[in-house]
């Protein structure tokens, strides 16, 4: 059976998504990328191609044949032309429609996965958007029964091991993290990762590293109580469920190459604890993967980059890696579910 294509959303039309999508398509042979199409405005898509062709399609089934001829585009017209670097509230509804359509196609089985280009939330808020962010909107669209888990990864390269990290708390001020940290939240995040690693990544015996919150893992309570009162009890619950969870482990010795070989994912307590090491190891190829949805969703691990939009400077590597990850996760799920 032929593999299904991947649907790529338009993202913020005034950002770099047209350019990185076009550059990813132009590099399709170099990276052996799976067939993909973008749901967006054909003129917007052409703006990123620098003279390369657009191939308009009417349905996902047309993507494979069109993929060698031009960047396949499932048309969704903007309300006004996109101006690089200057978002327009007039186009906010179309940005959301691109996401809506991608989810519909994934849930109907017409595409293998979706890859979402970055959005400018402030513009969507001005247009009446009421969800905290992209992932929460996808959870709403897919009818997710529990909050999704954010997992981020960068690939291995030669002898250098990559990294997977998952977040217990996400977009919070650092001062609010301790109050929002809970045994239940840690257990839920770790469970989601332990379930996803075999099905999505082919990791048969997942090894989780649970990061401490405080320096030196709290120094037996001298530098904070969260390790004793919250994190250690969560780890005990995970182990009682048969999950291989080590910790709490001091974060300052958790991310070097030798340590990364000892685990399959690090469960991090807050945003920068996860993102700083990931982006230090491989700034260009980080990928955001959403666990807990009934569809495969990945996205580049960067924003809309309005400051360089339309200048020909955008790096497509994160989107390319997101496309490869989406293909691999979709394949792994099919193989796992067929067992």
Image: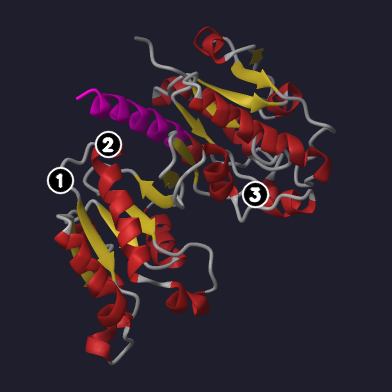
**Residue at 81% in and 45% down:** 89
Q: What secondary structure predominates along the stretch shown in magenta?
A: helix
**Residue at 55% in and 42% down:** 138
**Residue at 46% in and 37% down:** 297
Label 2, secondary structure: give it: helix
> Relative to residue 188, is residue 213 depicted above or below?
below
Q: How is the image coloured?
A: secondary structure
> Relative to residue 324, is residue 230 depicted above or below?
below
> Relative to residue 32, is residue 250 depicted above or below?
below
Q: Is residue 55 one of those drawn in magenta?
A: no
Work out how far the residue at label 2 is from the one at label 1, CA to CA, in angstroms: 11 Å
- Residue placed under numbered mark 2 in the picture: 199
Residue range of the region highlighted in magenta in the rendering: 320-339
- Residue placed under numbered mark 1 in the picture: 205
Label 3, secondary structure: give it: loop
Label 1, secondary structure: give it: loop
**Residue at 57% in and 27% down:** 104
Q: Can residue 23 be seen in the rendering of this structure?
A: no
Badge 1 or badge 3: first in the primary sequence: 1
Where residue 167 appears, x then y in whole percent?
40, 59
Q: Quadrant of residue 62?
A: top right
Work out how far the residue at label 3 is from the one at label 2, CA to CA, in angstroms: 33 Å
Q: Is residue 332 one of those drawn in magenta?
A: yes
- Residue placed under numbered mark 3 in the picture: 305
Please identify, in this view, whether the residue under mark 1 or under mark 3 is nearer the observer: 1
């Amino acid at each position: 059976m032929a593999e299904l294509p991947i649907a790529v959303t338009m993202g913020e039309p005034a950002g770099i998504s047209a350019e990185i999508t076009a550059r990813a398509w132009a590099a399709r042979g170099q990276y052996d990328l799976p067939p993909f199409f973008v749901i967006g405005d054909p003129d917007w898509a052409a703006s990123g191609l620098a003279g390369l062709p657009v191939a308009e399609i009417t349905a996902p089934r047309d993507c494979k044949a069109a993929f060698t001829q031009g960047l396949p585009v499932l048309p969704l017209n903007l309300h006004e032309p996109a101006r690089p670097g200057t978002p327009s509230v007039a186009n906010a509804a179309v940005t959301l429609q691109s996401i809506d359509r991608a989810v519909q196609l994934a849930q109907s089985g017409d595409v293998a996965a979706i890859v979402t280009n970055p959005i400018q939330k402030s513009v969507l808020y001005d247009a009446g958007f009421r969800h905290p962010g992209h992932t929460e909107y996808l959870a709403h669209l897919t009818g997710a029964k529990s909050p999704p888990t954010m997992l981020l990864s960068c690939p291995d390269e030669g002898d250098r091991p990559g990294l997977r990290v998952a977040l217990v708390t996400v977009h919070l001020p650092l001062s609010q993290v301790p109050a929002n940290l809970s045994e239940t939240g840690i257990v839920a995040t770790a469970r989601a990762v332990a379930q996803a690693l075999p099905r999505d990544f082919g990791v048969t015996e997942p090894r989780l590293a649970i990061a401490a919150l405080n320096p030196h893992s709290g120094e037996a309570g001298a530098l904070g109580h969260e390790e004793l009162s919250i994190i250690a009890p969560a780890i005990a619950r995970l182990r009682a469920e048969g999950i291989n969870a080590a910790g709490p482990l001091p974060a300052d010795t958790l991310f070097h190459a030798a340590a990364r070989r000892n685990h399959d994912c690090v469960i991090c307590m807050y945003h920068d604890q996860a993102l700083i090491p990931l982006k230090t190891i491989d700034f260009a190829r980080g990928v955001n993967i959403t666990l807990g949805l009934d569809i495969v969703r990945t996205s580049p691990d960067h924003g809309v980059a309005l400051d360089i939009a339309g200048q020909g400077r955008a790096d497509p590597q994160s989107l390319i890696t997101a496309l490869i990850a989406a293909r691999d996760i979709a394949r792994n799920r099919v193989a796992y579910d067929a067992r």
